[in-house]
Amino acid sequence: MGTPIARAGSVIPADTRPWWMTALAVACFAFLVVNVCRDLFVADARDVEVWLGFEIRGRPAILTAPLHWAILATGAWAFWTCRRWVVPWTAAYLFYAAVSHVVWSEASPHGRGWPIGVAQAVAISLLGILLLRARPPAARPTR
């Protein structure tokens, strides 16, 4: 059996982590690296953040960028360590992102209109539904 991943009141062996949790941990980490590099080294990207579909610019964007970093870092850690709460939380974040795409598509001058926003929202929501249907491994109580 693999190295156990300890959690409060339960242990999940590392070798029982589903492939999709590993893939999502790696994806969150990759997005984190890209976002941090982009926010630190690309001036145009650094000066814009999107929250609930609305672009914020300048100092507020710079000050809120670490919130996106924290979300991605938490997702990477939680998927890697098989935290059961990460599945519904990530699905909720995906549904939030879906709504944000509809709003951004209409509110932003860079948006492509509501039909594209709705198409993006449907695709993102399907990912959220698939994630909710996935089953994380059952935890075994510690002794």
Image (tube, grey):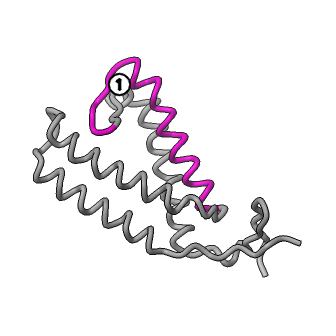
Looking at the magenta stretch, what is its main secondary structure? helix
Magenta includes 76? yes
Residue type beneath disc 1:
Asp
Q: Quadrant of the C terminus?
A: bottom right
Give whichever of 40, 53 is nearer the camera: 53
Asked if 29 appears above or below 125 in the picture, the reply is: above
Quadrant for residue 12, please give it.
bottom right
- The residue singled out by tag 1 in the image is 47
Q: In the image, is 131 to the left or to the right of 8?
A: left
Residue located farthest toward the right when viewing the structure as drawn? 143
Quarter holding the N terminus?
bottom right
Taking the image as shown, residue 59 lies to the left or right of residue 109, namely right
* Residue 101, horizontal then vertical, whole percent: 25, 47
Q: Residue furthest bottom?
A: 1
Q: Position of residue 59 (x, y in %)?
A: 40, 17
Q: Secondary structure at mark 1?
A: loop
Query: Residue visible at 53% across and 75% down?
Result: 135
Residue at the (35%, 49%) spot, across then down: 96
- Residue occupying image coordinates x 28% and y 48%: 99
